[in-house]
Image: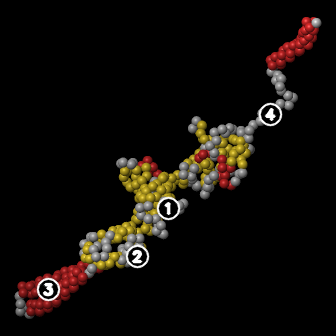
Amino acid sequence: MSDLQDSRARARHFRISGPILGIGLLAISAALWLGLRGVDLWATDSPAKAETTTLELAAADVATVARAVLTRSLPVTGSLSPLVQTTVKAQAPGEVLEVTVREGQTVRDGDVLVRIDTRTLDAELDSRQAALEKARADLALAKLNRDNSASLLEKRVISQNAYDTTESAWQANLASVKLAEAQLSQARIALGYATVRATFDGTIAQRLVQPGEKVESGSSLLTLVDLSHLELQAPAPADEISSVKVGQIATFHVGGFGERRFEGRVERINPMTDTSSRSVMLYLSVENPDGALKGGMFAQGELILDETEPVAAIPLTAVRTEAGLPYVFAIDGGKIARRPVTLGLRSEEQNLVELRAGLETGARVVSAKINTLKDGTPVTVTAPTAGSTAYSSH
């Protein structure tokens, strides 16, 4: 009985599977035929367009073409030194009685700095004064003898030789008076040197003697500097010296002054190149009316070589190149647009480059270094602000 049931079941399965298999073979054949005709079995009556991802940029990633004054500059570094400085020396020997100033003290032209003992100088002055008085007395007597001799000569009482002797004596005494006057003047000058005075407005940098010390003529007493005018000595590369001119302005900063900037003006250019460094020394004058800068301070800054009128400019980071040709990615109509550009003066310090052609003022460009940008990509900029220009247009 069971064998009969199995036979019937197999017969029913054959009857059911046969039509299904035929339908499957028919479907496969139809698909192959449609495939050969280029028909997409999965296509619908209303095909959907492929979706494109919109690129989202931050405001800091975008810059606006704006007008700016561009400069090309040369880095300068060097030490500051007072333009006028001197070592005050003794011009008269003696013992130092008083030093009236100390380091850092400001003085005016004519102020007393050092006093030297004048007793020896006073005695010398008195001696010279007495010598002059004696010479004048001798001259008066010689003049009287000459006048008497002249009167006697007219009366032919004495000979010409006798008169010539008195004339010669008068001339000698006249010379003695002049010598005595000169020696007296020297003694007075030496006495004046005993009081040492400032020869210009300045600041005491060094005090080299103390009261009680003996000094000779030529001994160093003090160092006096004028801080109102400083000089910055800065080496410049020899291959850049053709662009450096007298009168050009450098701006620099000095440690300890924060963001404060100082200015210097090129006054002189050394005519020789340093053979070891291949550099040429520049000398820049620096006005320091408030005395804030001190001698020996180290300065770092830039010497402005070229400066433009206000021109259209973009950040250097916005510029890309392909085969040596520059281009930018602009934002036009909500999409990324590749635009070839013509560039001019570059300012590495300002991170700007002149834009001569390719975009108008006010156009927006991608300034961030994004390597996946493609022409035509939809783009949005989040939180746009006036600061998105990313540079100053002064």
Q: Quadrant of the C terminus?
A: bottom right
Label ID, residue 160? none
Residue 147 seen by the camera:
no
Earlier-in-chain disc, 1 versus 3: 3
| Disc 4/disc 2 C-alpha distance (Å) | 88 Å
Q: Residue at x 80, y 17 (%)?
A: 36
Q: For the residue labelled by badge 1, is the local secondary structure a helix, a strand or a loop?
A: loop
Q: Residue at x 25, y 76 (%)?
A: 94
Dot in front, 4 or 3: 4
Residue, disc 4: 49
Q: Residue 29's spot in the image, x, y percent?
A: 84, 15
Q: Give neighbour class at mark 4: few <14, some 14-19, many 20+ (Cα, 10 Å).
A: few
Residue, disc 2: 108
From the viewer's perspective, is residue 18 above or below residue 379? above
Residue type at tag 1 = Gly
Label ID, residue 256? 1
Earlier-in-chain disc, 4 versus 2: 4
| Disc 1/disc 2 C-alpha distance (Å) | 28 Å
Does the CB distance between marks 4 and 2 fall below 8 Å? no
| Disc 3/disc 2 C-alpha distance (Å) | 49 Å
Residue type at tag 4 = Lys
Residue type at tag 2 = Arg
Residue 391 lies left or right of residue 217; in this view the side is right
Q: For the residue labelled by badge 3, is the local secondary structure a helix, a strand or a loop?
A: helix
Residue, disc 3: 170
Residue type at tag 3 = Trp
